[in-house]
Image (cartoon, rainbow, N blue to C red):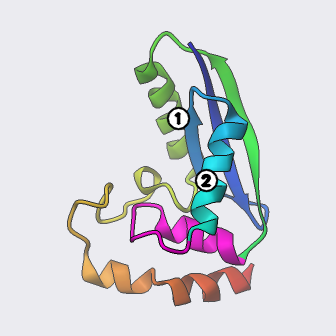
Amino acid sequence: MKGFIYGIFIKGSLAYVGKTTRSPHERWAEHESYVNDKTLKHSQQNHLYEAMRINEYEFKMLYEGDFASNYELESKEKRLIEELQPRYNWEGVRAPYRYSNQKVDKEWWELHTIESEKKLWQLF
């Protein structure tokens, strides 16, 4: 199966690594629709989309190849996340939760509010 691993870059820095077996352009359009949808409930990637709303961003292909299974594609994505440490991949940082249905550590959450994101991005 054909698989793609892509990066979302904000202000030239790698912010997120994702994977897809669909057309990369189709997947990128999906991300852009989330950026434009201001009604999104809080989700795992809410901070990524908020950062994309207030900064210039671009999508780049990081890896393209044939994979024996979705597991193999996912493993390659996770290795890249570990190596590159993008800011908004929960798997790549020691965030208090990986998925939105798990409990959130309040202190960590207060440090990662939308206002602090805006202040942080102004430093770059």
Q: Is residue 50 visible?
A: yes
Please determine whether, in this image, residue 68 is positioned above or below residue 3. Answer: above
Q: Residue at x 66, y 18 (%)?
A: 65
Percent coordinates x, y for residue 86 in the rendering: 58, 55
- The Cα–Cα distance between marks 1 and 2, rounded to whole angstroms, is 17 Å
Q: What is the span of residues highlighted in magenta in the rendered image? A: 38-54
Disc marking residue 9? none
Disc marking residue 31? 2
Percent coordinates x, y for residue 78 in the rendering: 47, 37
Q: Which residue occupies the foreground of this view, 75 or 61?
A: 61
Mark 2: which secondary structure? helix
Mark 1: which secondary structure? helix
Q: Which residue occupies the foreground of this view, 31 or 84?
A: 31
Q: Residue at x 58, y 73 (%)?
A: 50
- Kind of residue indicated by mark 2: His
Residue 99 among magenta residues: no
Q: Of the residues under marks 1 and 2, which one precedes in the sequence?
A: 2
Residue 49 among magenta residues: yes
- Kind of residue indicated by mark 1: Glu
Quadrant where the image shows the N terminus? top right
Q: Which residue is mark 1?
A: 77
Q: Which residue occupies the foreground of this view, 4 or 28?
A: 28
Viewer-nearest of discs 1 and 2: 2
Q: Residue furthest left?
A: 103
Q: Residue at x 54, y 90 (%)?
A: 115
Left or right for 90, reference 57: left
Please determine whether, in this image, residue 20 is positioned above or below residue 42. Answer: above
